[in-house]
Image (tube, rainbow, N blue to C red):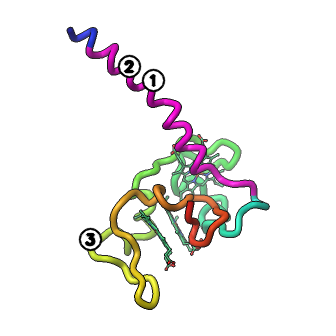
Amino acid sequence: MRLLTSSVLAAALLALAPAARAGAARLAPLPRAEAVVVHGPYEQGACDACHARGDPRDPGPAKAGKETCLACHDEFGGTAPVRIGKGRSHPIKGECVGCHNPHNSRKRKLLL
Ligand code: HEC
Ligand code: HEC
Ligand code: HEC
């Protein structure tokens, strides 16, 4: 029984792997010429603000969770809507990288 459970689990994980990779590709940096907005830490080569290493040629895995972003954007960590302009407030639910590319973007505000 135990063996069966773990092999089913392994199969499920394998099935998920391509989706996880597609997710990372969606968040990958765009070629410079395509981007209209560039995120400060990416521009400055501070890969290690989010990745395991600071080497731009091999930064290693990144932490995609909210905490990574909140280290610098703590104003978005609360439960109350954040005003970001006249009559506009920022969404409070969801993962930051569900809507923003952490590197650069073709759209304003690093939107995906
Ligand atoms: C603000 C946070 C942040 C910074 C700064 C940042 N990254 Fe990332 N990066 C991420 C996240 C989050 C992902 C997606 C990771 C995932 O989903 O597995 C990612 C993914 C990537 C990928 C795609 C990886 C893949 O498996 O396809 C590349 C390439 C990359 N980053 C390069 C860089 C380089 C080079 C720098 C520094 C010049 C950098 N990043 C700086 C957050 C960041
Ligand atoms: C090391 C500090 C640092 C971290 C970590 C960081 N940011 Fe930022 N972020 C900045 C700074 C500085 C700016 C303002 C300069 C700029 O626009 O790039 C900024 C600006 C932004 C903007 C506004 C861009 C615009 O065009 O006005 C967005 C959106 C954003 N960050 C999203 C994120 C997300 C999502 C993450 C996590 C994956 C993240 N940031 C992590 C430092 C950081
Ligand atoms: C549901 C989508 C969504 C999620 C999730 C999200 N954002 Fe945003 N964010 C936006 C949109 C849309 C804008 C641009 C709003 C506008 O300017 O009208 C924005 C704007 C911003 C800005 C620029 C604010 C300014 O003053 O112009 C920053 C910084 C930012 N987001 C950071 C984050 C961080 C950090 C997280 C996670 C804690 C996050 N966002 C999660 C959609 C999202």
Q: Is mark 3 on a helix, strand or loop?
A: loop
Instruction: Confirm if mark 2 falls within 8 A of ligand 1.
Output: no
Q: In this figure, which residue is indicated by the disc labeled 2?
A: 10
Q: Is mark 1 on a helix, strand or loop?
A: helix
Quadrant containing the C terminus in the rendered view: bottom right
In the orientation shown, which residue stands out farthest toward the bottom? 86
37 over 87 or under it: above or below: above
Q: Residues within 10 Å of mark 2 (few under 14, many from 20)?
A: few
> Which of disc 3 and disc 2 is earlier in sequence?
2
Residue 2 percent location from the top left of the image? 22, 11
Mark 3 near mark 1, Cβ–Cβ under 8 Å?
no
Which residue does the image show at 58% across and 41% down from the upper left? 60
Q: Is mark 2 on a helix, strand or loop?
A: helix
Mark 2 near mark 3, Cβ–Cβ under 8 Å?
no
Which residue does the image show at 41% across and 88% down from the upper left? 87
48 over 81 or under it: above or below: above
What type is the residue that disc 2 sits on? Answer: Ala
Q: In this figure, which residue is indicated by the disc labeled 3?
A: 79
Which residue does the image show at 61% across and 72% down from the upper left? 108
Residue 62 percent location from the top left of the image? 51, 46
Q: In this figure, which residue is indicated by the disc labeled 1?
A: 14
What type is the residue that disc 1 sits on? Answer: Leu
> Which of disc 1 and disc 3 is earlier in sequence?
1
Q: In this view, does 105 lie to the left or right of 52?
A: right
Q: In the image, which disc is placed on residue 48? A: none
Q: How crowded is mark 1: few (under 14 residues within 10 Å), some or many (20 or more)?
A: few
Magenta-span inclusion, residue 81 = no
Mark 2 near mark 1, Cβ–Cβ under 8 Å?
yes
Part of the protein shown in magenta? 5-31
Q: In this view, does 105 lie to the left or right of 17?
A: right
Which residue does the image show at 67% across and 64% down from the upper left? 106
Q: Distance between the residues labelled 2 and 3?
A: 37 Å
